[in-house]
Image (tube, grey):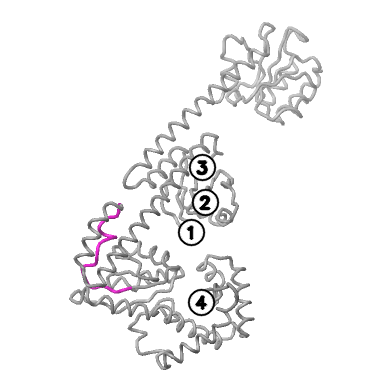
């Protein structure tokens, strides 16, 4: 606890006597300054106990002297008697009382340096106490991080309690993963616009935001320059050094938890990819044994890892859309997701397939959906269902069901070889443009998002200005107007044909 004038006045060895300002004695004292200047304020920072013998004090100017000290934020005034003055001037006492400035008399027997030593000792004790509090908080947060399951959530909850406010853990996109404290929803919403500054290369280590009755700190989490999430904390008062230390400790623990979670997820996805290959090969028993043997070691429960036991629909999306699909999967409930070649494949109950695909599409993904496979046809019917989902994925719609695609559309009326030749010729200038192979995928994202710059740029992971530049280059290379509906239709057909050809090879 910071030293106050009340503690100094109560220190018997100093023998200080209070003359005015009793109501302000609980104000913290951050240092002791000695000055005989008529105006010492240029050399002060605020929160000091100013000591003087009044050698240059003119009693009739006491009011102006006190007013300058109050304006500067001085915590109190100590007046030494026995040298220039035998007693504290009454004019100074009246001025201090009127301004509410604590005024103490320092007797001749008490050296000014003795007052400074007492304050220094109290400040040292405060620092020691703060260090102890920080170490204790670090220990509590570390123990919370070791809990299984629920480590990150426990750290966030502990952080909110330690700072006496609210806390939240956000993923890379800014979505809330864990939150604690009543002010978290509004606080997180208020900082969303600041997250881009922390995603940019060379970003600051943290951001501090202050408003009426609200102080917020945002800290990015990650390693090697890659931001993988954010910790956001807020409270009614500015954060103390101990508070910042606690926030930094929690940030380090959460960053480690995110990295460990990422590694576990990568391992779990690898295991599910093996199980999916076994399942597509018709060996459901081996697939189940693979998941049962390895799943517990990865910290995954049976629901998200287990194989489907009833009718299923197959969903497929490109790897670039996997995150949106998996986020939607987390909301849909138990389902099986795994990599299959260059696709991400999900087996889900047919009545959940449509909702899951629409949620993923709303996040910017393109999803293909197969027809339902009855339980009696499993696992033999899965390869055909996967091919249906692949074919539906190549359509122009964000969500396409094979049942709506089969036997319909312009591509079904065109000879496949002729369509492939048309696509190759139309897209050749983009593929041959130096090393800029990203022009084809940028065009695909631009058309898939119906020309919406922000959505397409987010899908590609680039800035919208970068995407605009690429589209201008595409238009120049092709000699086409990308605003023309006919041009867009031809390009989308070409891209769909090229995509089907690449997946088929």
Measure how far apart labels 3 and 2 are at the Cα level.
Answer: 30 Å
Label located before the other in sequence (3 or 2): 2
State the residue in front, 159 or 138: 138
Res 224 label: 2
* Residue 181 x/y as whole percent: 43, 45
Mark 1 secondary-structure assignment: loop
Measure how far apart labels 1 and 2 are at the Cα level.
Answer: 18 Å
State the residue in front, 130 or 345: 345
Question: Would you place residue 494 above or below residue 57 in this image?
Answer: below
Determine crowd level at label 3: few under 14, some 14-19, many 20+ residues with C-alpha closer than 10 A: many
Q: Is residue 181 visible?
A: no
* Residue 237 x/y as whole percent: 54, 39
Residue 433 sits in quarter = bottom right
* Residue 46 x/y as whole percent: 67, 29
Measure how far apart labels 4 and 2 are at the Cα level.
Answer: 30 Å
Mark 4 secondary-structure assignment: helix
Determine crowd level at label 1: few under 14, some 14-19, many 20+ residues with C-alpha closer than 10 A: some
State the residue in front, 402 or 351: 402
287 vs 137, left or right, is left
Label located before the other in sequence (4 or 2): 2
Give the residue at mark 1.
Answer: 173
State the residue in front, 384 or 308: 384
Residue sitting at x 53%, y 41%: 236
Mark 2 secondary-structure assignment: loop
Give the residue at mark 4.
Answer: 444
Give the residue at mark 3.
Answer: 235
241 vs 476, left or right, is left
Q: Is residue 98 visible?
A: yes
- What residue span does the magenta drawing correspond to? 299-314
Mark 3 secondary-structure assignment: strand
Determine crowd level at label 2: few under 14, some 14-19, many 20+ residues with C-alpha closer than 10 A: few
The label nearer to you, 3 versus 1, is 1
């Amino acid at each position: 606890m910071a030293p106050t004038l009340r503690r100094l006045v109560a220190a018997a060895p100093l023998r200080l006597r209070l003359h005015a300002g009793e109501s302000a004695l609980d104000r913290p004292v951050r240092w002791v300054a000695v000055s005989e200047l008529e105006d010492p304020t240029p050399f002060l920072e605020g929160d000091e106990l100013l000591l003087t013998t009044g050698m240059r004090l003119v009693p009739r100017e006491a009011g102006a002297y006190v007013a300058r000290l109050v304006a500067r934020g001085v915590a109190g005034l100590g007046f030494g008697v026995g040298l220039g003055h035998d007693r504290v001037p009454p004019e100074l006492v009246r001025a201090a009382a009127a301004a509410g400035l604590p005024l103490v008399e320092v007797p001749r027997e008490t050296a000014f340096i003795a007052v400074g030593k007492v304050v220094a000792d109290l400040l040292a004790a405060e620092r020691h106490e703060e260090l102890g509090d920080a170490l204790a908080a670090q220990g509590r947060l570390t123990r919370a991080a070791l809990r299984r399951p629920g480590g990150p959530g426990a750290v966030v909850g502990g952080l909110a309690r330690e700072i006496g406010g609210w806390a939240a853990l956000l993923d890379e996109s800014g979505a809330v993963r864990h939150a604690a404290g009543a002010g978290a929803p509004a606080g997180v919403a208020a900082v969303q616009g600041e997250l881009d500054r922390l995603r940019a290369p060379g970003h600051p280590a943290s951001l501090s935001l202050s408003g009426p009755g609200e102080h917020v700190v945002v800290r990015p989490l990650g390693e090697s320059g890659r931001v993988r999430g954010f910790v956001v904390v807020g409270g009614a008062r500015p954060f103390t050094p101990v508070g910042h230390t606690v926030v930094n400790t929690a940030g380090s623990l959460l960053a480690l938890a995110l990295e460990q979670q990422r590694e576990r997820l990568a391992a779990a996805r690898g295991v599910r990819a093996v199980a999916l290959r076994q399942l597509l090969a018709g060996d459901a028993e081996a697939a189940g044994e693979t998941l049962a043997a390895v799943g517990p070691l990865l910290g995954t429960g049976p629901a998200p890892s287990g194989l489907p036991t009833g009718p299923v629909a197959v969903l497929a999306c490109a790897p670039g859309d996997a995150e949106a699909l998996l986020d939607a999967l987390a909301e849909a409930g138990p389902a099986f997701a795994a990599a299959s070649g260059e696709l991400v494949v999900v087996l889900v109950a047919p009545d959940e397939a449509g909702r899951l695909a629409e949620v993923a599409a709303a996040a910017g993904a393109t999803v293909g959906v197969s027809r339902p496979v009855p339980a009696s046809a499993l696992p033999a019917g899965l390869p055909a269902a996967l091919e249906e989902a692949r074919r539906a994925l190549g359509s122009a719609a964000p969500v396409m069901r094979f049942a709506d695609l089969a036997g319909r559309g312009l591509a079904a009326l065109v000879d496949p070889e002729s369509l492939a030749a048309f696509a190759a010729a139309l897209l050749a200038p983009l593929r041959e443009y130096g090393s800029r192979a990203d022009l084809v995928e940028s065009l695909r994202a631009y058309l898939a998002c119906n020309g919406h710059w922000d959505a397409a740029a987010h899908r590609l992971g680039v800035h919208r200005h970068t995407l605009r530049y690429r589209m201008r280059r595409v238009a120049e290379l092709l000699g086409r107007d990308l605003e023309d509906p006919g041009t867009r239709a031809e390009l989308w057909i070409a891209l769909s044909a090229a995509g089907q050809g690449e997946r088929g090879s």
